[in-house]
């Protein structure tokens, strides 16, 4: 089924773009809660739920920030209130020593696996693992040197645009393109955790695609699947949601992450939404052919003698739809019957003297 002719890119052999079903990505992030076995179980659960890909985050507390109790480094409000940045990242990071095992499990499950690097050393690690794509997190999209290094690897680059102005998005896009890399996906995103659906303004997704001539998608931090499924109708080609095994077990991102059944529901709904897009079509579809009989058409409702005129009393627009179209009703009124007609007869051209719909 033709769904669009715009350009697409490939991530590990999977085409992503307007002509293809949206790529659904389960963001593992820090929901492993410091346990490798849990991280591996998350990958398997994502596959069982129907996700196309899993994504990690590659950093350490020391590559993100410095240990400090100064107010600048303390989080005030929200899920992580009272923690220092260093404490949060120490808690949430995915140990670099796990990466090889995580990517191996994803390959075993037939999932695409990639990551968000947060500094140059993370890029080097991910390159050694031959990642098929890179993700730039919203908070890093102003780090143009990092974007340049990632884009220079020649692989697809996915950038979340949370908090970004048009100028900042333009700078990031230009940075990618100056490396000669045109494999770019921009994700509309609201960098609030969790995010309120009223803040999402998902029409922005379509504007991103048109304004920057890129493939667009959604990084969704809301608590249900409404935003993600709705985005498909606006052309979303890439949908990312945080994923956990069980919110009740806690974790850095658990409060705004999907559980397995919810991810399964998302994947199924995205499939149905995508299939429903189809293409521009008017007229009777194959599925509607059996319903045409329930349309109105012109029927004789009183016995009419040959030569008798059609009137509002003996000709009506009623169901079913076996007669002439109601649009001919006024033209036929006053015309003479070409033959005797019984009540309940569907009117056709052969019954009207000196008139035919074929001449209209």
Image (cartoon, rainbow, N blue to C red):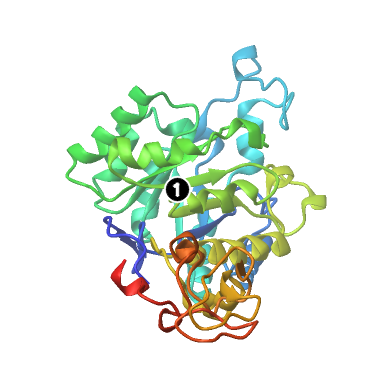
Between 174 and 207, the one nearer to me in the picture: 207
Quadrant in the picture for residue 165? top left
- x and y percent of residue 34 in the render? 68, 51
Closer-to-camera residue (110/359)? 359
Residue at x 51% of width, y 83% of height: 306
Quarter of the rendering occupied by the N terminus: bottom left
Q: Which residue ends up furthest to the top in the rendered image?
A: 71
Residue 254 percent across, percent down from the top left:
72, 47
Asked if residue 68 is positioned above or below residue 190 in the image, the reply reads: above
Kindly tell me whether residue 188 is visible in this rendering.
yes
Q: How many marks?
A: 1
Residue 86 placement, left or right of 285? right
For the C terminus, the image quarter is bottom left
Question: Residue 2: x percent and y percent?
Answer: 34, 68
Task: Give residue 7's quadrant in the image.
Answer: bottom left
Q: Which residue in the rendered view is the most extreme toward the right?
A: 248
- Determine whether, in the image, residue 201 is placed left or right of residue 88: left
Provide the residue designation for mark 1: 217
Q: Is residue 112 left or right of residue 358?
A: right
Label 1 sits on a secondary structure element that is strand
Give whichever of 273, 42 is nearer the camera: 273
Tell me residue 311's x, y (percent): 57, 65
Above or below residue 246? Residue 289 is: below
Q: Is residue 231 above or below residue 177?
A: below
Is 319 drawn above or below residue 238 in the view shown? below
Crowding at label 1, few (<14), some or many (≥20) Cα neighbours within 10 Å?
many
Residue 195 in view of the camera: no
Q: Residue at x 40, y 77 (%)?
A: 353
């Amino acid at each position: 089924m033709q769904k669009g002719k715009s350009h697409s890119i490939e991530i590990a052999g999977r085409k992503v773009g307007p002509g293809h079903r949206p790529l659904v990505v389960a963001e593992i992030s820090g929901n492993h809660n410091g346990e490798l076995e849990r991280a591996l179980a998350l990958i398997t659960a994502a596959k069982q739920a129907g996700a196309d890909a899993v994504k990690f985050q590659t950093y350490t507390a020391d590559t993100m920030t410095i240990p400090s109790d100064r107010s600048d480094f303390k989080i005030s409000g929200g899920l992580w209130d009272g923690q220092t940045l260093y404490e949060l990242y120490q808690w949430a990071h995915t140990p670099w020593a796990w990466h090889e095992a995580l990517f191996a499990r994803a390959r075993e499950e037939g999932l695409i696996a990639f990551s968000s690097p947060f500094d140059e050393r993370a890029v080097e690690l991910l390159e050694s693992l031959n990642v098929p794509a890179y993700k730039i997190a919203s908070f890093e999209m102003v780090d143009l040197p990092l974007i340049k290094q990632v884009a220079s690897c020649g692989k697809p680059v996915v950038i979340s645009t949370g908090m970004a102005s048009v100028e900042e998005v333009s700078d990031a896009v230009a940075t990618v393109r100056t490396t000669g890399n045109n494999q770019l996906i921009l994700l509309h995103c609201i960098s609030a955790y969790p995010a309120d659906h009223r803040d999402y303004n998902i029409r922005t997704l379509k504007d991103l695609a048109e304004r920057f001539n890129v493939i667009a998608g959604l990084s969704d931090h809301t608590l249900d699947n409404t935003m993600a499924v709705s985005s498909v109708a606006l052309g979303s080609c890439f949908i990312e949601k945080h994923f956990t095994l069980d919110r009740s077990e806690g974790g850095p991102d658990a409060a705004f992450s999907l559980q397995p059944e919810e991810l399964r529901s998302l994947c199924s709904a995205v499939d149905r939404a995508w299939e429903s897009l189809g293409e521009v079509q008017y007229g009777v579809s194959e599925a509607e052919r059996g319903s045409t009989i329930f349309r109105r058409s012109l029927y004789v409702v009183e016995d009419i003698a040959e030569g008798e005129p059609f009137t509002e009393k003996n000709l009506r627009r009623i169901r079913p739809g076996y007669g002439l179209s109601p649009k001919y009703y006024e033209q036929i009124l006053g015309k003479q019957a070409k033959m005797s007609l019984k009540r309940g007869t569907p009117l056709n051209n052969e019954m009207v003297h000196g008139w035919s719909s074929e001449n209209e």
